[in-house]
Image (tube, rainbow, N blue to C red):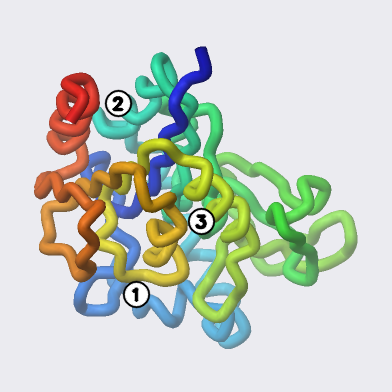
């Protein structure tokens, strides 16, 4: 018997309980930096040293935290379902929790690539992306093609190369689960609209929703507690 497909869309709220700061707070700051200075292509062109230092610090911080119960609960769904995780997060906590099929919409913190290369429909060519773990990179650190290395992050002002793969995953889902995002940052915020009309959609987020859709079941809680509620709902057939 084929397993039902669950596509899980995750945002900053799923990693916040591990101690990772949310990407953008209401004051427009991320770790006391203006978001446009450290998370936009214009910021990179203005001051690449600042951007590299910022992501070096984020990369080091990542290895001081652990996956939380929400990450583990999402990974545990693979026992009974065919699960694809589509995440806006750049951390590797889903991987470390045990999830095996992950689409990183906004890139990956532990990876770097040449600043002059290369993307296609399925994302950046694996030949051009390098996993450096917690290591730092600096101005003058070059890729094999002679270009400056930059974080493998999709910044504001850049295309989201894996959006089509994410749409495919949502379209294929029998159940759509949204965790830790209030559906405000596009294009990811519009992904749920690609779900088939007859499937249930659950969203776990403590904030009020900015969208209205009759298919949505809002579990108004933090990710760890919300995942417990979600599992109870699907196990009871709700």
Q: Determine crowd level at label 3: few under 14, some 14-19, many 20+ residues with C-alpha closer than 10 A.
A: many
Rendered location of residue 45, percent (x, y): 62, 84
- Quadrant for the C terminus in the image: top left
Instruction: Using the image as rendered, state which of residue 234 and residue 138 is in the foreground.
Output: 234
Q: In terms of secondary structure, where does tag 2 sit?
A: helix
Q: Is residue 203 above or below residue 92?
A: below
Q: Is residue 88 above or below residue 155?
A: above
Q: Is residue 59 visible?
A: no
How far apart marks 2 and 3 lie (CA) works out to: 29 Å
Q: Which residue is drawn at 48% across and 48% down?
A: 170
Q: Which of marks 3 and 1 is nearer the N terminus?
A: 1
Q: In terms of secondary structure, where does tag 3 sit?
A: helix
Q: In terms of secondary structure, where does tag 1 sit?
A: strand
Q: Residue furthest right?
A: 145
Q: Earlier in the sequence, mark 2 or mark 3?
A: 3
| Left or right, residue 90 beside residue 204 | right
| Residue tagged 2 | 73
Q: Which mark is residue 56?
A: 3
Q: Is residue 237 above or below residue 179?
A: above
Q: Which residue is drawn at 47% across and 47% down?
A: 86
Q: Can residue 78 be seen in this view?
A: yes
Rendered location of residue 69, percent (x, y): 24, 28
Instruction: Using the image as rendered, state which of residue 229 and residue 238 is in the foreground.
Output: 238
Q: Residue 33 carries which label?
A: 1
Q: Which residue is drawn at 20% across and 46% down?
A: 204
Instruction: Using the image as rendered, state which of residue 207 and residue 165 is in the foreground.
Output: 165
Rendered location of residue 213, percent (x, y): 23, 62
């Amino acid at each position: 018997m084929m397993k039902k497909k669950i596509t899980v869309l995750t945002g900053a709220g799923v990693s916040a309980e591990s101690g990772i700061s949310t990407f953008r707070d209401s004051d427009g700051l991320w770790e006391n930096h203006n978001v446009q200075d450290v998370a936009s292509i214009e910021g990179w062109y203005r001051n690449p040293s600042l951007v590299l230092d910022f992501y070096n610090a984020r990369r080091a911080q990542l290895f001081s935290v652990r996956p939380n119960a929400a990450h583990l609960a999402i990974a545990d769904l693979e026992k009974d379902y065919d699960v694809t995780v589509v995440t806006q997060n750049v951390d590797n906590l889903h991987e470390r929790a045990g999830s095996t099929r992950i689409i990183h919409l906004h890139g990956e913190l532990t990876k770097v690539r040449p600043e002059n290369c290369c993307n296609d429909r399925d994302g950046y060519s694996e030949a051009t992306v390098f996993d450096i773990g917690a290591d730092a990179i600096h101005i003058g650190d070059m890729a094999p093609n002679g270009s400056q290395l930059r974080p493998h992050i999709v910044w504001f002002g850049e295309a989201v190369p894996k959006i089509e793969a994410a749409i495919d995953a949502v379209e294929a889902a029998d159940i759509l689960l949204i965790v830790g995002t209030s559906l405000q940052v596009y294009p990811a915020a519009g992904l749920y609209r690609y779900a088939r009309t007859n499937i249930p959609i659950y969203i776990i987020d403590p904030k009020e929703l900015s969208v209205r859709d009759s298919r949505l079941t809002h579990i108004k809680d933090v990710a760890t507690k919300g995942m417990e509620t979600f599992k109870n709902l699907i196990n009871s057939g709700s």
